[in-house]
Amino acid sequence: MNNLRNKVQLIGRLGMDPEVKVLDSGKKLAKFSIATTEAYKNQKGERVEDTQWHNIIVWERNAEFAEKFLSKGKEIALEGKLSNRTYEDSNGVKRYTTEIIANDFVLFGKK
């Protein structure tokens, strides 16, 4: 059961082209967001769609793959873990964010 701790699996569409950076250490990372949509019927029987946005981080080889093959609107499946961090914005206000550090992903659709 250890491999089930802090595990996330999602299928969604990219909301933006990946933003790729090379850090001072030489490591490459890519950031992008994906949207997942869940549909259900409310109490009146009307179909309702709920879209959630997720911030994704990929490193090294996955970042290189993302840079070459991912773009806004593409559908992917990914597996990773949740990561929480804090930072100060430009006004000095402490902000909190949750991201998914993806260790594997698959591109859906046509090449």
Image (cartoon, helix red, strand yellow):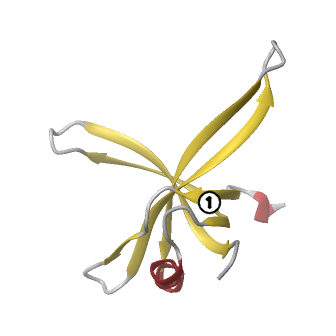
Q: Which percent across, then down, holds residue 10?
A: 69, 57
- Name the element at disc 1: strand
Of residues 1 and 62, which is closer to you in this image? 62
Q: Is residue 104 left or right of residue 45?
A: left
Identify the residue shown where x is 17% and y is 39%: 92
> Which quadrant: the N terminus?
bottom right
The residue that mark 1 highlights is 81
- State which quadrant residue 108 falls in: bottom right
Q: Is residue 95 above or below residue 8?
A: above
Q: Which percent across, then down, holds residue 111?
A: 64, 83
Identify the residue shown where x is 70% and y is 73%: 109
Instruction: Pick out the residue farthest to the top.
Output: 44
- State which quadrant residue 17 falls in: bottom left
Q: Which percent across, then down, holds residue 75?
A: 64, 64
Tell me how many marks there are. Answer: 1
Identify the residue shown where x is 62% and y is 60%: 81
Q: Amino acid at mark 1?
A: Lys
Q: Is residue 64 left or right of residue 77?
A: left
Mark 1 crowdedness (10 Å alpha carbons): few <14, some 14-19, many ≥20 = some
